[in-house]
């Protein structure tokens, strides 16, 4: 079940419909004008299923299951940040195919997960931002609010992003595309001192078999839920930007 409304902090919540009505009546809701509010609502309510994807590989499996079953509210600021990245990917797709490049390349493969004496197939899917066949090169695009240019600090979630890139590389190889080089391209929305801060980071590629084994471990609790109805254990690393905290609300 997708998100049902906005969470404004503490225990203050409002349905999407009520927020839209207020924006229509007063010109804005919590500082968001109606067209932006509707776009963010669509972002928050996009239907998602249970499969392994680069973007959700390290998301708590229990939370992923519960978000399909239980109503919850989301922070507008979190959705706005996510929508910025989505917009950039849509623009890249609108550019169309450039000579020698694939933009927004959809990829799909299947894992085999062993449950007792049974083998169960489970999907892995994602969309590669940029793939250059002649160079066997993969580039993943990320937007971040953290300062990049001239900063010695690491980009937040850099290790997670590098693992995501390795999943894209695994998907490409499974689909018949060789990958010999991979990079993350970070960009900060807006200008700082008249320029866009951006950074290209080379990603170490892990062995194909090793990535496959990690993906099986990630898929296993989701497969057990689908096959046996067993709710996965909570693996939340930080408090999610949703209300209520579903993993704590629902007893094991």
Image (cartoon, rainbow, N blue to C red):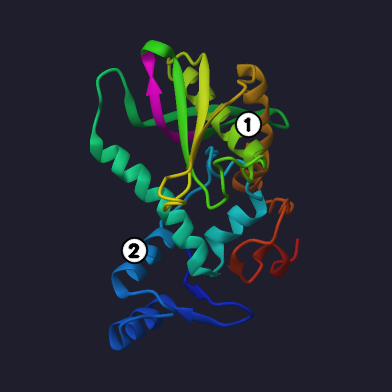
Asked where in the image residue 227 lies, by quadrant, the reply is: top right
| Residue at 51 percent of width and 17 percent of height | 181
Q: SS at mark 1?
A: helix
Q: Estimate how packed mark 1 is, as few (under 14), some (14 to 19) or many (20 or more) residues with alpha carbons within 10 Å.
A: many
| Main secondary structure type of the part rendered in magenta | strand
Q: Estimate how packed mark 2 is, as few (under 14), some (14 to 19) or many (20 or more) residues with alpha carbons within 10 Å.
A: few
Q: Is residue 251 visible?
A: yes
Residue 27 has which mark? none
Give me the C-alpha separation between circle 2 and circle 1. Answer: 32 Å
| Residue 241 spot, x, y in % from top left | 59, 64
Check if residue 125 falls in the magenta segment.
Answer: yes
| Residue at 29 percent of width and 69 percent of height | 35
Between 122 and 181, the one lying in front of the other is 181
Is residue 53 rendered to the left or right of residue 23?
right
| Residue 92 spot, x, y in % from top left | 31, 38
Q: In front of the other: label 2 or label 1?
A: 2
Residue labelled with disc 2: 39
Check if residue 126 falls in the magenta segment.
Answer: yes
| Residue at 52 percent of width and 27 percent of height | 183
| Residue 188 spot, x, y in % from top left | 48, 48
Picture quarter with the C terminus: bottom right
Residue 215 has which mark? 1
Q: Which residues are magenta?
A: 124-133
Q: SS at mark 2?
A: helix
| Residue 174 spot, x, y in % from top left | 49, 19
Between 178 and 148, the one lying in front of the other is 148
Is residue 242 rendered to the left or right of residue 247?
left
């Amino acid at each position: 079940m997708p998100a049902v409304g906005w969470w404004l902090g503490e225990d203050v919540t409002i349905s999407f419909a009520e927020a839209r009505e207020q924006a229509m009546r007063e010109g804005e809701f919590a500082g968001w004008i109606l067209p932006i509010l509707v776009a963010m609502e669509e972002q928050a309510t996009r239907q998602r299923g249970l499969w392994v994807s680069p973007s959700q590989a390290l998301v708590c499996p229990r939370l992923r299951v519960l978000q399909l079953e239980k109503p919850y509210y989301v922070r507008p600021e979190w959705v706005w940040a996510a929508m910025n990245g989505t917009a950039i990917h849509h623009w890249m797709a609108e550019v169309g195919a450039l000579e020698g490049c694939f933009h927004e390349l959809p990829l799909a493969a299947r894992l085999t997960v062993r449950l007792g004496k049974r083998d169960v197939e489970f999907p892995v899917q994602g969309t590669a931002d940029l793939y250059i066949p002649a160079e066997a090169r993969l580039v993943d695009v990320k937007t971040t609010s953290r300062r990049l240019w001239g900063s010695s600090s690491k980009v937040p979630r850099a290790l997670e992003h590098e693992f995501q890139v390795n999943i894209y590389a695994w998907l490409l190889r499974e689909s018949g595309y060789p990958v010999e080089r991979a990079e993350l391209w970070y960009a900060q929305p807006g200008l700082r001192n008249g320029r866009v801060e951006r950074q290209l980071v080379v990603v170490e590629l892990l062995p194909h078999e090793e990535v496959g084994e990690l993906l099986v471990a990630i898929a296993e609790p989701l497969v057990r839920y689908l096959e046996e109805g067993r709710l996965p254990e909570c693996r939340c690393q930080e408090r999610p930007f949703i209300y209520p905290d579903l993993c704590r609300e629902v007893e094991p």
